[in-house]
Image (cartoon, rainbow, N blue to C red):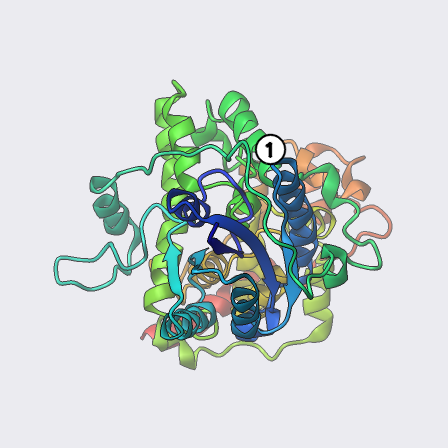
Amino acid sequence: MTHALIWFRNDLRLADNPALQAALRGGLVPVPVYIHAPEEEGDWAPGAASDAWRHRSLHALAADLQARGSRLQVFRGPSIDTLQTIQACTGAQAVFWNRRYEPAIEARDTLIKRNLQQHGVQAQSHNGALLFEPWQIETKNGDPYRVFTPFWRNASTRWRLPTCTDAPAHLPAPPLLPGALGIDALKLSPRLRWDSGFWSCWTPGERGAHAALARFSAQALDGYQQQRDRPDIPGTSHLSPHLHFGEITPWRIARTLENNPACNDRDAYLRELGWREFAHHLLHHFPHTPEANFNPRFDDFPWAAPESSLLTAWQQGRTGIPIVDAGMRELWQTGWMHNRVRMIVASLLTKNLRLHWQHGARWFWDTLVDASLANNSLGWQWVAGTGADAAPYYRVFNPVLQAQKFDPQGDYIARWVPELAPLAPTLRHAPWSGLPPHGYPAPIVDLASSRQAALAALERIHS
């Protein structure tokens, strides 16, 4: 039988996999391969937390393939050279993959597709990650959107969910390929096990993704609209890393939630999926935004000179501002942070400390297990006020008021900053108003005066 290479990337699943389905529909024997080439991702090679997740997700995919009679074969090296070598070895007539949308990857994949086709090989890419391709939604003038609400209003009128396809029960055995490596040879898992706390919170792989969806649909969707901003309760889906690594698709999530009677809350969650779509829309049309301000007016903003002690205190969760420290410690220990808290810690860095949003974006990139270039860029520029559909430039989150509103008893703070747990709930939000526990630092910045300084700096560039 004729073979087809299935080039796995950030689509580490067998269900709802358009590239795999294309091979099976064509009567071709799928040859699953994974090629590790982080240097081809330019300035945004995956961070350490992403690597740790990928290590486990690849093992899960390999086990799922093996259980069906197939195998995942792993390589390290230039993608085009590796694909050409494998294609020549197998005589494969096609190479199928699911698209990625990072600028460096899009450019690379275009060259690879052209090269394969010039050598007489069928090369097809598919949408395996999004509800809408980034170029499908446009304004009446044919321009990309810059504001989320009209983008999602337009997208919602074009809502056509793909049909879900279960993982094949059996796959034919592909040929053994010379030069294939073991997954462990990629050295994605950290030698010093700083990630050990992650795995009591997460189960990478397709099964883990489906289990997380089932839990969310059964336990947290009803009430999601009111609870999603509360870091002290399990009110969110925890699906973001599974979506990022393609262990589950947004259309399977949407179809699953369609069958849940919590209609209003379902729509609120689908809107969050819409933000993910919007992030990819912006990244495709404005590929400079991971490095540069979307709003060029901020190119003249007087960012503070980075002071290593302040940046380190923020990174380590030692700012003396409890909700910020709780978030940064949750991030370090679990590889994830609640979205409301992400906004709070980002506001402190970019507004109160007035450090460039790139410092935060880079730290999140290395430490988040759901580090998506599209979402990370949109999120940081949104809070900093420099981006598309950004929070008003004059908005400065007050971390104490935010904590009082969204962590009213200080339970989230007590969990991640245990030295504050013995305090009364009201003091957990602002321990400096009483007698702070020994060893907990004083705030590294005065919230009131730094807010005024940020507003004055912002006013200068908007006057």
Residue at 56%, 48% in the rendered image? 12
Residue 149 in sight from this viewpoint: yes
Q: Nearer the viewer, residue 194 or 264?
A: 194
Residue 323 in sight from this viewpoint: no
The amino acid pointed to by label 1 is: Pro
Counting from the top left corner in percent of width and height, residue 155 is at 25, 46
Disc 1 designates what residue?
A: 408
User: In the visual, does 121 lie left or right of 438?
Assistant: left
Label 1: element kind: loop
* Rendered position, 315 above or below 251: below
Residue at the far top: name it: 261
Residue at 79%, 41% in the rendered image? 418
Quarter of the view holding residue 123: bottom left
* Rendered position, 123 above or below 256: below
Residue at 72%, 66% in the rendered image? 312
Counting from the top left corner in percent of width and height, residue 8 is at 53, 55
User: In the visual, does 137 lie left or right of 254?
Assistant: left
Q: Nearer the viewer, residue 451 or 119?
A: 119
Q: Nearer the viewer, residue 420 or 237?
A: 237
Counting from the top left corner in percent of width and height, residue 76 is at 66, 68
Residue at the far left: name it: 140
Residue at the far right: name it: 438
Quarter of the view holding residue 140: bottom left
What is the number of callouts on the image? 1
Rendered-image quadrant of the C terminus: bottom left
Q: Nearer the viewer, residue 146 or 462?
A: 146
Residue at 55%, 50% in the rendered image? 245
Counting from the top left corner in percent of width and height, residue 47 is at 64, 63
User: In the visual, does 139 lie left or right of 82?
Assistant: left
Pointer 1 local density, CA inside 10 Å: few below 14, some 14–19, many at least 20: some
